[in-house]
Image (tube, rainbow, N blue to C red):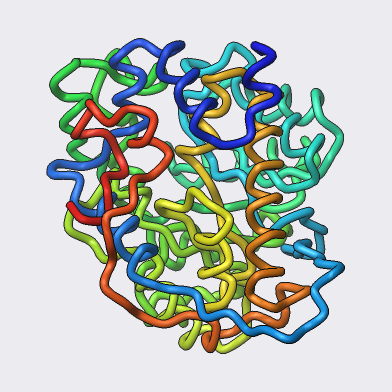
Amino acid sequence: MPEEIDAAATTHAIIDAARANLADDVWDYIAGAAESETTARRNRLGIDSLVLRPRVGRDVSVVDPSASLLGHRLRIPVVLAPIGALEAITHDGGIASARAAERFGTLPVISSVTEPSFEEVAAATPGPKISQLYIRGDAEWSEQLIGRVVAAGYAAIALTVDSAHYGRRERQLRSGWRPPTHRGGAPEPGIVWQARLTWDRLEAMRERSGLPAIVKGIQSGRDAEIAVERGFEVVWVSNHGGRDLDHADATIESLREVVDAVGGRAEIVVDGGFLRGTDVLKAIALGASAVAVGRLAALALAAGGEAALVRVLEILEEEITVAMALLGVTSLSELDEGFVRRAPAIPAASPLLAAFPERANDWPRSSAT
């Protein structure tokens, strides 16, 4: 990795390097979303529409930004979201993500549609990992896949439920690029199986695994209640980064409803547009246990592989620690809804746009758009 990326003080330089390293079609795969990309922009707008309310007169000389998820300590309340086709972004694929997570001190979530295999990723990194699964076959197929995940020693299983159909991602449609795992046939091989996914089958897969289970893609309080009733230990609030259903609600808005519905009976993860430490703290104040970063992690890997991703996590840690002190808290447990309130969003360029202001269609846009 270039020395300037290793010493980067902000995410801007890392995103700049990622853009320089990526072909246009792969860049659009990472940055793009479904149709008008309104859901992706709404994710960012929802975060920008919350302001922080600091307290003063408190001793914040020592700040602890650590958290936990499923009993695993997290150096910061950030995990690495599953990313499909990582092998098109960095030559080590999922291994790079897992190694970066282990080096830094967080959990990687490894996608079932990235390379190399679950077993190879597990063999390369002894630390705890979560496997994320798309359903590409019948009950027997699922049972065999879950058996492989268990045998490989994964700490938990995450079942994705918001992808009954592959979204109309217009940047990919224009370029004709498909992730390697989607080539040679329909937009998403085995799409019928994901479309047939029901709560009964999800519960059966959870029971078959014997692992702590996460349901990923919850966007309503009612579905969050069902997930808890079905025995899932973690409810993951996600709209797939706006990549499937356009015009969905911002995940940080869905988070409020899900937190109320879960009522402390499960841990909660949220993703969707999170780029900075202050973004993360807003989610924690609203009741999330951790935030997952996907696009930001993918761009870091494109910029410089494992080392660049570790550096991005270090930058997030610095941002979180400074913001906690300025908010007047020394631990994440002190944050609650009293530290945030709604306010009109103002134009605030994301690191992605700040690096490439000439690319008006790049995700996520300014909160003013």
Q: Residue 20 or 189: which is nearer the viewer?
A: 20
Above or below, 298 relative to 280: above
Q: Position of residue 42 (x, y in %)?
A: 26, 58
Above or below, 257 relative to 189: below
Q: Residue 214 or 61: which is nearer the viewer?
A: 61
Above or below, 19 relative to 44: above
Image point (69%, 14%), residue name: 3
Q: How many marks?
A: 0
Q: Residue 348 or 262: which is nearer the viewer?
A: 348
Q: Position of residue 302 (x, y in %)?
A: 52, 20
Q: Residue 178 or 348: which is nearer the viewer?
A: 348
- Left or right of 42: which side holds 324? right
- Tell me where residue 56 sits by quadrant: bottom right
Image point (14%, 41%), residue name: 35
Image point (50%, 35%), residue name: 83
Q: Position of residue 9 (x, y in %)?
A: 63, 34
Above or below, 132 relative to 47: above
Q: Is residue 272 visible?
A: yes
Q: Is residue 140 visible?
A: no
Image point (40%, 56%), residue name: 161
Which residue is farthest front?
Answer: 57
Q: Quadrant of the N terminus?
A: top right
Q: Position of residue 178 (x, y in %)?
A: 30, 20
- Tell me where residue 73 sits by quadrant: bottom right
